[in-house]
Image: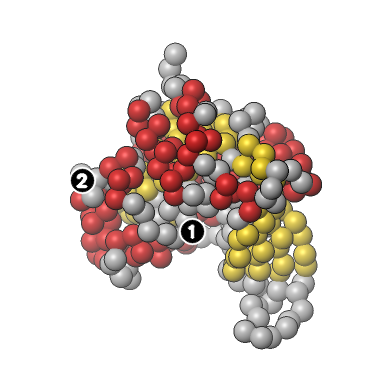
């Protein structure tokens, strides 16, 4: 059987979002404009993105036995994500994120991990059979790092492409680096991982090359409205994006990663997949919310950008 589809291993949160003219200063109280609840969490966001793009998508995560889990599960199922391998923790609440968005579309986020940090390496081992026929495994850093490492090991053992979105920014153990086929940091995350200050393309290249020397095969740096850069042993290439009106940048990185994984799972080239991911992320930032901002494949085609 040919390998197909994407297995996303990661977090799920209910996002509590407040929009305001600006962010409050420390100790200051301001009036917000609007309050809404959105399904979120980097893992679930990326799974919804891949599924809406028509990709066979499975999700492994851990939620609490509460109302938030019920809300999040419905959204995942409606998007077409297989959640039959979701774990339920009886002692921890489902993850939550508190998000403030200003009038420029910039955001500040506080994540309360809850059950997400209870997803263990043993949980992943118990689902080893899912890796057998999966083309791409995608993880982030809102779950324990030991669980991410175990996921990378099983991906390598089963010849699946392993993508790590190193967000939120955190140091990585050396033993995971040679297992990473694609790492997708933003500039801040790249600085933390490499120890190199990034302020232009030259310094980004230098920082990425430090990661390549440690065994990572491809570094894809997301640059917001400047697009993204691919750096590997044979290529250094910038991929620009079209200018759009940013409404909410909350899930831009998740849209990029979900689309990248989806495209790679279908056998498209690295460059084709990055261009596609840029386009999907450009649509996502024009909409409010995380999972709710993810476009369907037909929407992208209708806009003539596939």
Q: Which residue is mark 2?
A: 233
Residue 66 is situated, as x and y percent measured from the top left of the image, at 76, 46
User: How far apart, in angstroms, are the residues tagged by discs 1 and 2?
Assistant: 26 Å
**Mark 1 or mark 2, whichever is nearer to me:** 1
In this rendered view, identify the residue nearer to me: 8 or 300.
8
Residue 56 in sight: yes
At horizontal 57% and vertical 36% (from top left) the residue drawn is 60
Residue 226 is situated, as x and y percent measured from the top left of the image, at 42, 61
Q: Which quadrant of the view contains residue 97?
A: bottom right
Q: Which residue is mark 1?
A: 168
Residue furthest to the front = 91
In this rendered view, identify the residue nearer to me: 215 or 303.
215
At horizontal 63% and vertical 49% (from top left) the residue drawn is 115
190 lies left or right of 141: left
Q: Earlier in the sequence, mark 1 or mark 2?
A: 1
At horizontal 48% and vertical 58% (from top left) the residue drawn is 168
- The circle drawn on residue 299 is none
Structural crowding at the residue carrying mark 1, measured as other residues with C-alpha within 10 Å and reported as few (<14), some (14–19) or many (≥20): some
Q: Which quadrant of the view contains residue 135?
A: top left
| Above or below 125: residue 101 | below
**SS category of the residue bearing label 1:** loop
At horizontal 29% and vertical 50% (from top left) the residue drawn is 174
Image quarter (top left, top right, bottom left or bottom right) of the N terminus? top left
């Amino acid at each position: 059987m040919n390998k197909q589809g994407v297995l996303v291993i990661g977090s799920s949160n209910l996002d509590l979002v407040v929009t305001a003219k600006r962010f409050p200063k420390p100790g200051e109280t301001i009036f917000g404009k609007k309050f809404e609840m959105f399904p979120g969490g980097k893992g679930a966001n990326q799974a919804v993105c891949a599924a809406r793009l028509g990709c066979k998508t499975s999700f492994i995560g851990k939620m609490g036995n509460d109302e938030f889990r019920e809300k999040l599960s419905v959204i995942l199922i409606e998007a077409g994500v297989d959640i039959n391998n979701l774990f339920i923790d009886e002692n921890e609440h489902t993850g939550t994120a508190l998000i403030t968005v200003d009038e420029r579309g910039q955001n500040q986020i506080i994540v309360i991990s809850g059950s997400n940090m209870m997803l263990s390496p043993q949980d992943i081992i118990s689902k080893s059979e899912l890796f057998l026929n999966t083309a791409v495994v995608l993880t982030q850093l809102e779950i324990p790092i030991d669980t991410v490492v175990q996921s990378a090991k099983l991906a390598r053992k089963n010849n699946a492409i392993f993508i790590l979105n190193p967000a939120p920014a955190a140091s990585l153990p050396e033993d995971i680096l040679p297992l990473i086929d694609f790492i997708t940091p933003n500039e801040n995350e790249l600085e933390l991982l490499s120890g190199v200050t990034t302020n232009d393309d030259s310094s980004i290249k230098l920082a990425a090359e430090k990661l390549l020397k440690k065994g990572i095969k491809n570094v894809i740096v997301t640059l917001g409205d400047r697009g993204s850069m691919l750096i590997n042993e044979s290529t250094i290439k910038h991929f620009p994006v079209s200018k759009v009106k940013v409404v909410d940048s909350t899930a831009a990185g998740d849209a990029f990663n979900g689309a990248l994984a989806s495209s790679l799972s279908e056998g498209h080239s690295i460059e084709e997949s990055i261009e596609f991911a840029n386009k999907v992320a450009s649509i996502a930032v024009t909409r409010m919310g995380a999972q709710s901002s993810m476009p369907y494949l037909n929407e992208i085609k209708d806009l003539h950008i596939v």
